[in-house]
Image (cartoon, rainbow, N blue to C red):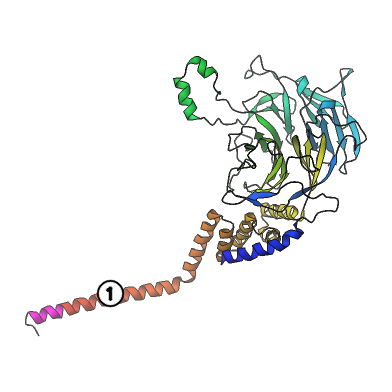
Amino acid sequence: MARTVKRWLVLLAAVSLLLVNAVPAAASPAPYESYNYNYWKEAVPSPDAYLPERTISGRDLGISEFKDPGDVNVSPSGLIYILDSGNSRIVVLDPDFKLLRVIDGFMMDGSKETFNLPGGLFVDEQERIYVADTGNGRVVVLDGEGTLIQTITKPESDILSTQFQFQPLKLTVDHVGRVYVVAQGVYEGIMQFDESGKFIGYVGTNKVERDYGEYIWRMLSTKAQRAQMVLFVPTEFSNADIDHKGFVYATNIDPGSNEPIKRLNPSGEDVLKRFGYYDVKGDIRFRNNPGPSKLIDVKVLGDGMYSVLDATQNRVFTYDDEGHLLYIYGGKGNQVGTLKTPVAIEQSGEHHLVLDRGKNNLVVYAPTRFGARVNEAVVLHYRGEDTEAVNIWREVLKLNANYDIAYIGIGKSLLMEKKNEEALGYFELGMDRKSYSVAFKRHRREMMKEHFGTFLTAAIALIVILILTRVTVKWRRRRQVDREAGFH
């Protein structure tokens, strides 16, 4: 029955695909292939979730062209900050992408200071701008107008070597002012500073996955041979973001890791949920054989969702809080919407922003009907409003009948409503074996409870019949024995 339903939905989707990419008139057709992975790790076509709407360059803003831009951040108030690293400046835009101002330096001790190849920036709720001034070995904190508040320089600590060089690359800040810095050459974790700029330790450490074959070979090798082998050292983090609860999301660029994305709690433990069909690590089948994903940025979208930027295929991968891959967009190329050297991803309202260093511009992506509905359903599920999410999931299935997450979402809603038998069919379609088992156990318990009286009556009757049969057999045997003994 479930398979028959799915066949009809697939046929319906074939007709609906003509309407899937209904987007604002300003949006361009997708210049890239949209796909997702099914339960068997097969890449299957998917409707576009996001389409390029426009690009923004320095010339478009009436200023000189961007040069090797390094980061982009949207403040809680909606202002867009672009770190134009090559020009040592910060370009500030309003939510409509209109130029507000340019910050090309700040006053410090009576003289003007400039940035030197800054790598990252973050803007907090008070519109304070935190800049990873990499070339100058410091973190600079400015107010919204560009006035200096404080600087964080090389920390003094017993756990740091005297030769340590402080070169901050990326950073993020929590709601109480703690600064989390991804620094070059630091393998111990993300550096953490308090609101006054004092170094208070590391958060999180990337685990080392040893190649035991190489480990044994090292034991048998000479000193010179061991010196040429890869050292078993943790990899560096590549970027970080923070959610409203204070959990730090971080990426690393180890291509051999199955956990390149982490969600670190205040104790530094990775608590990212990975309940999807496969590892949360970007591409899983190396499309067109370019190699595994190299994740260079992460953006917390809210309501459990987050996006990561892959520098290998120049794509964006978006997940829900349980680790399900929701959709993929982007790609390599020179067309509008394809990317050359992406370096950062951000969110502005319903739009996604990707900063492309190779093209020196900012690409603005708008959600399609399919992408918007997926986002809406995921948000409702995250907030526990599964009943309201069902109609949205059904609409998603009209757009893409192969979207397993929608079947699972409907199944979970039915499970919450104690419609266990109906939920079984949807979990089967979504290939969610764990949830199917839960629904099956509940349905079995339900059936037992419903028919317990009948079952008990039948069981008692059966026992009585067995007892009577046993008594009758014994009585007949006794009479037979009596006859044979001559007793009548």
Looking at the image, is 182 positioned above or below residue 431?
A: above
Judging depth in this view, the residue of 259 and 226 nearest the camera is 226
Of the residues shown, which amino acid type is indicated by label 1? Ile
Q: Left or right: 71 with respect to 45?
A: right
Return the x and y of residue 226 as percentages of the image width and height.
51, 19
Judging depth in this view, the residue of 130 and 254 nearest the camera is 254
Judging depth in this view, the residue of 314 and 323 nearest the camera is 314
Magenta span: chief secondary structure: helix
Return the x and y of residue 133 as percentages of the image width and height.
78, 24
- Look at 66% across and 59% down and name the residue there: 401
Q: Which residue is mark 1?
A: 467
Return the x and y of residue 96 as percentages of the image width and height.
88, 44
Looking at the image, is 141 positioned above or below residue 315?
A: above
SS for tag 1? helix
Tell me if I can see residue 33 in this picture.
Answer: yes
Which quarter of the rendered picture does the N terminus lie within? Answer: bottom right
Magenta stretch holds residue 483? yes
Tell me if I can see residue 122 in this picture.
Answer: no
The span shown in magenta is: 478-488
Q: Left or right: 172 with respect to 202?
A: right
Looking at the image, is 233 positioned above or below residue 341?
A: above
Q: Quadrant of residue 189?
A: top right
Q: Left or right: 105 with respect to 435?
A: right
Magenta stretch holds residue 199? no
Q: Quadrant of residue 101?
A: top right
